[in-house]
Image (cartoon, helix red, strand yellow):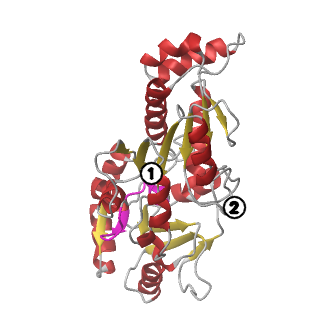
Amino acid sequence: MNPLLKSICEKSALTLGNVATRLGRIGIPPLATVAINMRPVNGPWGGSSVFVQQLETCLKRRGFRVQYHLTAPVDVIVLIDPREDLESKAFGSKAIKAFKQKHPAVQIIHRINECDQRKNTGFMDGLLKEANQDADYTVYISEWLRDYFLARGFDAYRPHSVIYNGADPSIFHPIGNTPWQPGEPFRITTHHWANNPMKGFPVYEKLDQLIANGDLPGVEFRVIGRWPADLHWRAAKTFPPANNHDLAKLLRQCHAHITASLWEPCGMHHVEAAQCGLPMIYHENGGGIVEAGRNYGISFNHDLLAAVQRLQKEYPVLRKKVLASAPDGDVMSMAYATLIARLIRRGSAPH
């Protein structure tokens, strides 16, 4: 970390970044270097890639150097995924451990956004627990995920917090989303990058059947992204995978979002829809999704038909709630930037 600016770290990350941006124009080095172990991927991809893009943009605006390699000097490492064979991996847990041994002042933030229960796997919890041993600070992306791992032996007394996901508000916003009026088609949408059945596809197929059978007159269903190969839609309108402005435009053409994803650590699909002004129907076993859904959604388990009908009935109130309390990517990114600045104060040493 630049010794000339070390004292500035006592201020907020926003103030720090504003100072660094101005000084950068006259040749002052970056405030500090943040290495992220997962590269962003262009095009439609999972939520981790979207998060990395937002974090990089936020940190650069605040005067930090962001890199995807462990070439010293590095002040903070952000561990997104510990797997060594991940396609978008920049470096893995083994490299982080070796770097920490050589540079003990570096601060490691472990952002935990996965678990075995989410995809019915049997390896992720162990990988995360092993990687977490080297972390100086842990961020869980939902309270549900925090409690999940605390129940599985993670130390509740080690430094940690919850930072809920948010999408880029310059892309995912409600401007242009026209409220539903009775007598018009009520358009419900869902969107997923993955086609794993645990994302809720049996429920989406059920909604499709209810519409096709005439049980939900006036309701349309739009599916964006991927779905299992053996799923054949009867009434739904389908769209290929989309991201950024293309996805946001499709979302704003609808009135509500449905997510039947089970035991989701948090996810991005329901966040993107909410920021576009769409209240939601969510499964009561949705994991971290439930934390947002309680604010502006209708939960269901077995009676999907009743949930859709209730959403239509309560739509005006729920839309006001989602406009007032949807997640926000700037708030999320700022929380990480503030945390990074605080950890730099704690662990920084002259290079």
Identify the amino acid type marked 2. Answer: Glu
Q: Residue at x 54, y 86 (%)?
A: 234
Q: Is residue 321 above or below residue 205?
A: above
From where the camera sits, is residue 276 visible? no
Instruction: List x then y, in percent, for residue 226.
Output: 61, 73
Q: Residue at x 58, y 50 (%)?
A: 50
The crowd level at tag 1 (other Cα within 10 Å; few <14, some 14-19, many 20+) is few
Q: Residue at x 27, y 58 (%)?
A: 294
Identify the amino acid type marked 1. Answer: Gln
Instruction: List x then y, in percent, for residue 123.
Output: 50, 71
Which numbered circle lies on residue 163?
none
Nearest the eye: 37 or 192: 37
Quarter that holds the N terminus: top right
Q: Give the extent of the magenta segment.
A: 269-287
The answer to whether residue 283 is magenta is yes
Q: Is residue 41 left or right of residue 342?
A: right
Q: CA distance from mark 1 to mark 2?
A: 24 Å
The residue that label 2 is drawn on is: 87
Which numbered circle lies on residue 133?
1
Nearest the eye: 219 or 311: 311
Total numbered labels: 2
